[in-house]
Amino acid sequence: MPHLPQTPGEPPPPDVLLDVRDLRTYFHVMDGTVPAVDGVSFQVRRGETLGVVGESGCGKSVTALTIMRLIETPPGEIVSGEIWFDGRDVLQLSQDEMLQVRGAEMAMIFQEPMTSLNPVLTVGDQIVEAVVAHKKLSRKAAWDRAIEMLRLVGIPEAPRRARQYPHEMSGGMRQRVMIALALSCDPKLLIADEPTTALDVTIQAQILELIRRVQAETGTALLLITHDLGVVAETVQRVVVMYAGKVVETGSVQEVLQDPKHPYTEGLLASIPSKGMRGTRLNVIKGSVPNPFRMPVGCRFHPRCPYAFDPCPDHEPPLDELGRPERRVACWLHTTPPFGLEHRPRYGTATPLPVARAAAAEQVP
Amino acid sequence: MAIPTDPALAGGLAGRAPADVATADVEVALESLGQWQLAWRRFKRHRMALVGLGFFSFMVLVAIFGPIVLPYNPLNIPGAQQPGGDPPSLQHLFGTDDTGRDVFTMVVNGARISVAVGGFSMLIAGMVGVLVGAISGYFGGWIDNVLMRIVDTFFAIPLLFVILVAARFFGEGQVSSLILIFGLLSWPLIARLVRASFLSLREADFVEAARAVGVKDARITFRHILPNAIGPVIVAMTLIMASNIVLEAFVSYLNFGISPDQTSWGNALANAQSALGLGNWWWAFFPGMAIAVTVMSINFVGDGLRDALDPRTRL
């Protein structure tokens, strides 16, 4: 399932910073094998911001950790795929070579600022550690760099704060430190894995604003992983929607949020509470995330899909283009089904997508 | 915690909600305190631990300097007035034994051996235990398996007999060999603790975050994981020290330990047995008390450390 026309083993054009191709990361656990990431492809250009959206367990975080080569093997295994980053396939690098890439060229912000900093080291020391690991700087210069980074992320009294321990800081402050830490070596790619999920709503907005600002200032590319479509709408240019280890839809943020093509994306959007829906029941996607040990055959979303029809339970839809290479959807509603099957609904509401959407619009007063 | 009140600050905070004021105040008041400063602060709140620490430090000083300043030679046998030893008097604060040796001198000299055996065997156990536990927990796999089976073996055999046999064969009553034997037999507990901490800390978010910025394995082990795992280890080490002091007394009491011509608390107790029938309590009482109080104070210190080093204990 190539994303853009490409030959396996061939680097992408130079303006593409990160090119993930048909990535499969499986976990071999006692009860069987979990295909956490199962054929994921996407690209991030230099300086671009991309959001990866999906519910818990859809493989977003595993994708990020695979790119960083932080998957523990065993139980994890990168079964296949290529991850082209800045002209080389990081899956071919040794762990020693990865030490030079991690932190220096790609860095990551984690979900839990409360536990992602070492409690026994001052925050300044932790930034210094990263700087010294990658830059030929004296400790003094590295310390100055740490303070400069803390200033960049808007921490007041940076020289004093640098000598503090994580427990002396609030969650929002710690997430700022994590961002400073991640950006301390000028990475080309910043991966933010649910950076605001663990924070208060008011702080969330500040941190998002901060990520947007430093991304613009430093020109780093951003891969933002989130389950929150609101976060995506405010922060990124392009979106990849994942479901059960696969990419189901890609496009610009406007395209995906305003004109979702995949029923799953549509369901995600419909389940956001809004003002106009006051007093009505919140829409939910019925059913639950599939059991990873027994992924549905065919389209993985079909058991929960209101529009599922003949080909869905048996045939996996390809991630086909919708007019241009970056607008894609993996759904039989938008692709000619194989073997001449008709668009004949079989499950659920049994209404084709446009009709159902119109009906839903009428119901809202 | 006393919070210095800055009038300008108080004015600025006046309009805020109470909760806000509280957080802001704490932010202002907090000095930058490291792991150890915070631990010391928590430790100080534990009164018995402070008393224990005081007494134990005193005991260490006694062990180091006591024998130098005492007027009596512990090996000098002047002979006693009464069979079974003289009762406490001004010349002999703790009385004498049946050969007229000063029991006070005996206790002070015994402190040297007992504290040395407890302390150094603890250090050996600590070093071996941390090393084995760290290797086991960090590398996992077959290395972990082999090391932990060795540890299991240590737990499975009745150590007391091993100690008695080893003390008889390798020791010939020397302090250094007793230290080695105790140390090399008491590390498995530490190794298990360290391994368990490493196993969980290896998965900690901050370890993953450190990996994500490209920190090397060795550095992660010693700079990120070990300091976080050290609390329970230190607590266990104090307990090992206490139990090894008791063990020394016990082994010496059975005449398997320190050779009888040296003075340890256990030796003193062993020799005092015969005098107890005569009602000469002081000969056994003072060395016994020395053991009991020292061990108790070490255990109090351990208790205090347990609270002080547990980062979940909040001030």
Image: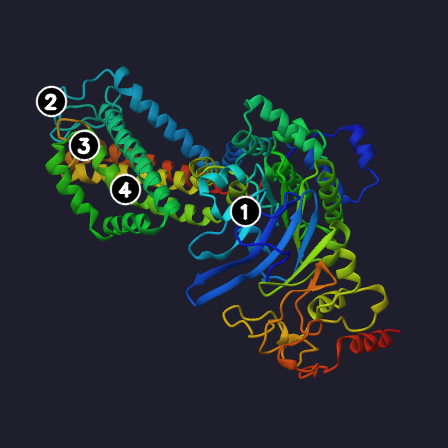
Residue B72 location in percent, x, y?
Answer: 21, 17
Residue A247 location in percent, x, y?
Answer: 63, 62
Tell me the colour scheme of the image.
Answer: rainbow
Residue A129 lies in quadrant: top right
Name the residue located 58 percent from the left edge and 74 percent from the top edge. A298
Above or below residue B170? Residue B200 is below
Q: Which mark is residue B186?
A: 4
Q: Say which of marks 3 and 2 sits in front.
A: 3
Quadrant position of the C terminus of chain A in the picture: bottom right
| Three-letter amino acid code of the residue under disc 3 | Ser
Q: From the image, tell me which residue sits under label 3.
A: B177
Q: Say which of marks 2 and 4 sits in front.
A: 4
As measured in the structure, the alpha-carbon distance from the residue carrying label 3 to the one carrying label 2 is 32 Å
| Three-letter amino acid code of the residue under disc 4 | Ser
Q: From the image, tell me which residue sits under label 2.
A: B79
Secondary structure at numbered mark 4: helix
| Three-letter amino acid code of the residue under disc 1 | Met
Sequence-first disc among 3 and 2: 2
Q: Is residue B134 left or right of residue A5?
A: left
Callout 1: chain: A
Q: Specify few, some or many for label 2: CA neighbours under 10 Å numbering under 14, 14-19, or 20 or more.
A: some
Name the residue located 19 percent from the left edge and 29 percent from the top edge. B175
Callout 2: chain: B
Q: Specify few, some or many for label 1: CA neighbours under 10 Å numbering under 14, 14-19, or 20 or more.
A: many
| Three-letter amino acid code of the residue under disc 2 | Gly
